[in-house]
C-alpha cells in the first residue's frame, strides 16, 4: 500500500491549481485562436474564389455586351454597304441619264425663222430632222448654223433638198456630242 503524503502548503497548492487552470485556459485560447485563424483563412480563400468567379462573370457579361455591340456595328455596317450600293447605282443611272432638253435648246437656238420641222428622230446620238423651209437660203443658213454649233457634228444636208427655191422639203442629219446631252455637275 502506498501512502501519499501531501506536504505542500495550502498556498502552494492553490498556486499549482491556478497554474494548471491557466495552462488549460491558454491551451483553450490557442485552440480557439488556431480555429479562428483557420476560419479566417477559409473565409479569405472563399472571398478570393468568389472574386475570381465575379471577374469571370463580369468578363463574360462584358464580352456578351461587346458581342451585342459588335453585332449592332456589323448590322450598321451591312446597312451602310447596302445604302452605298443603292447610292452608287443611282449615281450610275444619273451619270448615264441623257438630258435631251440641252440638245433641244441648242437646236432651237441654231434654227432660223422660216423652218418648219415635221419629223424628228434620233438613234443614240444621231439626229434626223425632216421638214419644210420657206426658201433655199434659209435652209443653207440652218445648215451653216448647225455646222457652227459645237454640240453638232457631221451635219449632212443632201443636195436633193436644195433643188427647189421656195417651200423646200428637206432632210438633215447630224450627230450630237455626248457631253452636250449629259448633265454637267
Image (cartoon, helix red, strand yellow):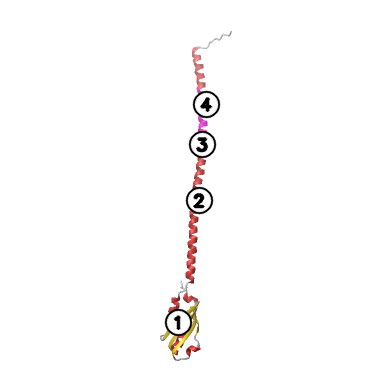
Picture residue at 48% right of the left edge, 85% below the top: 171
Q: In the rendered structure, are the residues bearing label 1 and label 2 in contact, judged by CB atoms less than 8 Å apart? A: no
Where does residue 19 sit, x and y in percent of width and height?
51, 19
Above or below, 131 relative to 45: below
Residue nearest the viewer, comparing 93 with 164: 164
Q: In x, y percent, where is residue 92?
A: 49, 68
Q: Which of pointers 4 and 1 lies earlier in the amino acid sequence? A: 4
Mark 2 → mark 4, Cα distance in angstroms: 53 Å
Instruction: Work out whether mark 2 precedes mark 4 in sequence or the reverse, and give the earlier one.
Output: 4
Mark 1 closeness class: few <14, some 14–19, many ≥20 residues within 10 Å: few
**SS for dot 3:** helix
Disc number for residue 108: none
- Cα separation, mark 1 vs mark 2, equals 67 Å
Q: Residue at 51% x, 21% y: name it.
A: 24
Q: Which residue is mark 3?
A: 46
**SS for callout 1:** strand
Q: In the drawing, what numbered circle is on residue 119?
A: 1
As drawn, the label of residue 67 is: 2
Amino acid at each position: 500500500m502506498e501512502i501519499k503524503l501531501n506536504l505542500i502548503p495550502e498556498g502552494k497548492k492553490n498556486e499549482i491549481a491556478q497554474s494548471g487552470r491557466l495552462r488549460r485556459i491558454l491551451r483553450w485560447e490557442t485552440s480557439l485562436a488556431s480555429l479562428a485563424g483557420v476560419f479566417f483563412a477559409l473565409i479569405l480563400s472563399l472571398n478570393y474564389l468568389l472574386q475570381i468567379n465575379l471577374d469571370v462573370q463580369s468578363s463574360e457579361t462584358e464580352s456578351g455586351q461587346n458581342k451585342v455591340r459588335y453585332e449592332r456595328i456589323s448590322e450598321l455596317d451591312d446597312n451602310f454597304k447596302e445604302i452605298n450600293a443603292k447610292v452608287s447605282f443611282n449615281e450610275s443611272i444619273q451619270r448615264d441619264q441623257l438630258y435631251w432638253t440641252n440638245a433641244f435648246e441648242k437646236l432651237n437656238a441654231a434654227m432660223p425663222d422660216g423652218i418648219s420641222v415635221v419629223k424628228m428622230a434620233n438613234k443614240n446620238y444621231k439626229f434626223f430632222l425632216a421638214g419644210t423651209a420657206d426658201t433655199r437660203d434659209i435652209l443653207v443658213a440652218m445648215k451653216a448654223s448647225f455646222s457652227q454649233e459645237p454640240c453638232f457634228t457631221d451635219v449632212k444636208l443632201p443636195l436633193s433638198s436644195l433643188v427647189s427655191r421656195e417651200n423646200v422639203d428637206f432632210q438633215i442629219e447630224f450627230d450630237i456630242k455626248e457631253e452636250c446631252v449629259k448633265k454637267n455637275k
